[in-house]
Image: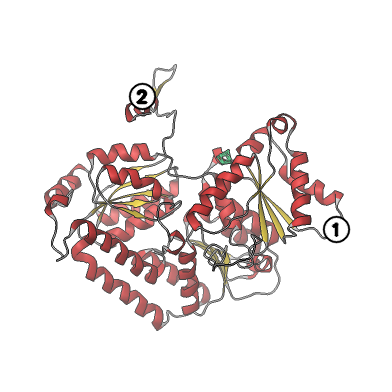
Amino acid sequence: MNNLKYDEIKIRENSMDGECHDKEFVVVNPTRMCQPMGAVQAMMGLKNVMPLIHGSQGCATYMRFQLIRHFREPIEVASTSLNEKTVIYGGEMNLLKALKNISEKQNPEMIGVMSSCLTETIGDDVEGIIRKFEDVNIGEDLPAMVSIPTPSYAGSHVEGYDKAILSLVEYFARKSVPNNKINIILGNLSPSNVVEIKEMMNDLNVGSILLTDTSENLDAPLSEETLELHKFGTSLEELEDTANSNATISVTKHNDSGAKYLEKIFDVKAISGLMPVGLRNTDIFINNVCNAMGIDIPDKIIRDRGRLSDVLVDAHAYNYRRKVAIFGDVDMVIAMARFTYEMGMIPKIFCVGSESSRFKEDLNELDEDMGYKPIALENKDLHDFEKVLEDNPVDIIIGNSYGASIADKFRIPLFRVGFPIFDRIGAQRISFIGYNGGINFVDAITNMILDFYYDEEGYKVENKELSFDPQGFDEFLLES
Ligand code: SF4
């Protein structure tokens, strides 16, 4: 289907009251993934756990396919394999069978049962079926079974991750003795970004419980072992211990439901932060940890911060006033926007696949700090993003692999972050979190700009000057 057709379909609806309503009938290249996908990613950071999708075979296959081509690791996601018959009569028998098979054959410590669009629509009582299975097998050594409701029509992978963490702490957290640790809810971060968080906690000399720790499981050494349950990651004992920590910091605002639950039930302070990307946001993260633990910022952290400041200065000449368009998850987009602004760039266009009041608040705060309003596309897709780019040229796009054809069309570079990245290797090693991740990011994006817009002597290549003109920038400010 060509662009014209899409435009015709993506029309507004004239309702009976004669008003023009902003309803779109099709999404073309969404900037979001499905809800159980986020929950499965949370499961990937747990030790000895099996994720089970209660839905059709295709749902689990789609998730395995996306996860494997992004992380390039073997991924196990079980399915209850619903078919036409179960759509009519319900999926109870399939779920009971799947729980039995997994318990007997794989013997995990926990099975995370994610619902899907189909089972939510037909109304299967997943929680009730799990309890029925436990009642029938009373006295057996069964794994823990956690139900995670993830209807994809009611949210994206971001909400899926959030619901998984909430379900885990609801099921496991138990008050015992204070552990003097910080719980950290990570969201869909790359294994390398998780490592950056772990290293910062190490440098701060603060014990932590990561929800959840994918750093080893999704960036594993080559092995000749057959595919089996993950041996690393957050343990169920650690999940239980989350009720005894000093605080819970969620590093993305849209993944803080578990933190709020722990605060409400166990009085564990909840801190919902901005993603620690760039100077300001990482400063906030470090201060939050130090305040929660009553400690001073160590010299090592101060030196790392100084090195990031130094890199920002070194790279400034190449990045100054380069216009950027960013698409992806809400928290990642807003964090990248602020960081590129710190780099001297002009974050000009943002596109996210959902609508959120917290995104709006963060955006307003950013607008005030920058002194202009970028173009913000909320609840939009990459087709809308592309249309906006036609009239608003930028120098670089930041987003996942689905932006490659758009970048090609406008002959600008795509800096790959987010999920999924399938047309490059090393997605699990992309890091931008914290001061050291920030250094990696500034180096990589500046080198991409140097490659694309400068010759080997470091002089600008004039015919590649797409949008760098101070005059245009002033016009942009006036327009906004
Ligand atoms: S049917 Fe729903 S749950 Fe299954 S893959 Fe599609 S969006 Fe995800």
Question: Which numbered tag is attached to residue 367?
Answer: none
> Which amino acid type corresponds to the residue marked 2 in the rendered image?
Glu
> Is disc 1's CB within 8 Å of ligand 1?
no
Q: Residue furthest right?
A: 139
Instruction: Residue at 55% x, 67% y: name it.
Output: 222
Q: Quadrant of the C terminus?
A: top left
Instruction: Residue at 57% x, 63% y: name it.
Output: 211
Mark 2 element type: helix
Q: Which residue is mark 1?
A: 140
**Quarter of the image holding residue 264?**
bottom right
Spatial CA distance of label 2 from label 1 is: 59 Å
Q: Which residue is mark 2?
A: 8
**Quarter of the image holding residue 408?**
top left
Q: Is residue 74 visible?
A: yes
Judge whether 159 appears above or below 449 on screen.
above
Q: Position of residue 434 (x, y in %)?
A: 40, 68
> Is disc 2's CB within 8 Å of ligand 1?
no
> Which amino acid type corresponds to the residue marked 1 in the rendered image?
Glu
Q: Is residue 290 visible?
A: no
Q: Residue furthest front?
A: 224
Instruction: Residue at 57% x, 62% y: name it.
Output: 212
Q: Position of residue 59 (x, y in %)?
A: 59, 42
340 or 30, which lies in front? 30
